[in-house]
Amino acid sequence: MLWQTGKKDMLDLALGLMLFISALLSLHSKDTMKSGVFFIIFGFLSGLIWVRLEAPDVALVEIILGSAITGLLIFKLVKGSKQKDLKAFTFTRLWAGFISFLILIFMLFHLTTIERQDRIASLVFENLHKSGVDSAVNAVLLNFRGYDTLLEVGVITLAIFGLLSLGLKREAYYWDNPLLKGFSRLSLPFIVFFSLYITYLGTFSVGGAFQGGALLAGGLVLFALAGQALPLKASIIYIFTMAGLGVFSLIGLLYALLGYGFLTYPLELSTISIMIIELSIWISTAFLLYTAYSGKL
Amino acid sequence: MIWFYYILAILLVIISLYHFIVARNYVKRLIALNILGSGVFLFFITTAKNTNTESPDPVPHALVLTGIVVAVSATAIAVSLILHLNKEEE
Amino acid sequence: MAFEILSIAFMFIGAIFLLAGSIGLIRLKDTYSRLHALTKADVLGFGFIVLSCILSTDLLSHWIKLLLVWLLVISYSALVGYALANRKKRYA
């Protein structure tokens, strides 16, 4: 049939054009509210292009985190601050244009030397059966390059520390309405269950810990947008927030003490280690991103 | 058709870099930083598609995943810093 | 074979409804009229596209997932319509 012929160039062209136009509109508009809205559209179209480029795990995280949560944070800024009207000097514009032009020339020159090769991809696919999961991206993320993921969880924890230590007393925007309250209460159990399912799905298909954590963060932010606090004790929220970094580094240290090396899973225990780490990343990413939006723990 | 996405990523990077330097207020600068990050991620994902194996290269996908989460946390702390800045001027 | 042709036809009809909703969103003058375009035409177009996706596959799990997606989108769309109308009535 028509969609099997592989002639999807029109789709590429249309998506790319819409992405470029939304980026231009976001950067050129005088009103910061319009910039925020066009940025959300840009993030959504970016996610669609990544699905087209056969990267569905990354597209999930981009649409939830990069488009929705970042858009919410930018709207928090738009509604909470005055507009500072710094007018750029002509010299700044000329210099910025010159730098951009230089980088354009450099990158176009670099484009001519790109060739079609597999860098480490064949190595990854050959060793996939030794890694404990069946999904290539999650094998790379949690087994082959697990140290990067540990440092990433550390980075987001440190960022939330910094955000909390600024001590902002301003509340996040919420809308006190019985319809939104009831709706968020109805959908939160479903979102919790579905995000756990997506986290479990990451061991053999599209999905993973960060996707599930981002989805649960979205559900929690929806709950907070209705103006209600989470019905959990503060100590439980603290445990959930620090669980990612704690469990991940404890497992790494455990394997170092047992003699295998830091974060080097033995072959039989790799699946169960990855599942424990994925659960801890799931719950801590959700609560950390919820804290990033709401500003208080 | 890969070249189209490469050129799109390069255009996103240079236009957001220009606006990052010539920004009129902090919100615009933050948005330009995020679009810069998205352009770089598009470059990575396009490079991941450009392989000889039949499924795309998973290593740039893992790097971009890390990059998105780090960009969101950087945006969160930038937002709180800007709010703090604006509050101290009142 | 017939299902595939019907699926393409439904996708075109859905695209036309979505286009009409977007034109209404841009060209209508009042917020309340724009909400009519947003919550009626857009959701109907989305429903047709979901219908075409249902017709193009024959797995029961895909049908259930697509129906869930459709239910979620229409309920969230109704909620957003109510939110916008309430805010417009209260503050303007």
Image (spheres, rainbow, N blue to C red):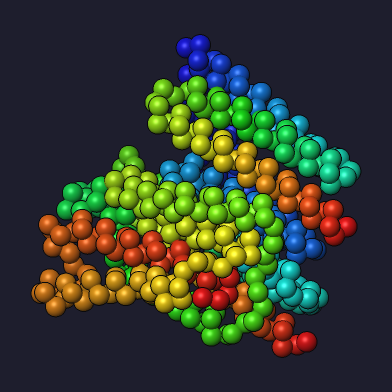
Q: Residue at x 63, y 60 (%)?
A: A226
Q: Considering only vertical position in the picture, is A28 above or below A246?
A: above
Q: Considering only vertical position in the picture, is C65 above or below B7?
A: above
Q: How many marks?
A: 0
Residue A176 placement (x, y as % from top left)? 69, 62
In the displayed structure, does residue A296 sit left or right of residue C91? left
Residue A293 placement (x, y as % from top left)? 57, 68
User: Quick one: which residue is furthest to the top in this view?
Assistant: C2
Residue C31 placement (x, y as % from top left)? 84, 47
Q: Considering only vertical position in the picture, is A137 above or below A100?
A: above
Q: Nearer the viewer, residue A187 or A35?
A: A187
| Residue A280 appearing in the image | yes
Q: Residue at x 88, y 45 (%)?
A: C30
Q: Considering only vertical position in the picture, is A64 above or below B52?
A: below
Q: Residue at x 47, y 52 (%)?
A: A189
Residue A29 sits in quarter: bottom right
Q: Nearer the viewer, residue C49 or A24?
A: C49
| Residue A28 appearing in the image | no
In the displayed structure, does residue A48 sit left or right of residue B87? left
In the displayed structure, does residue C58 sit left or right of residue B13? left
Residue A285 placement (x, y as % from top left)? 43, 65
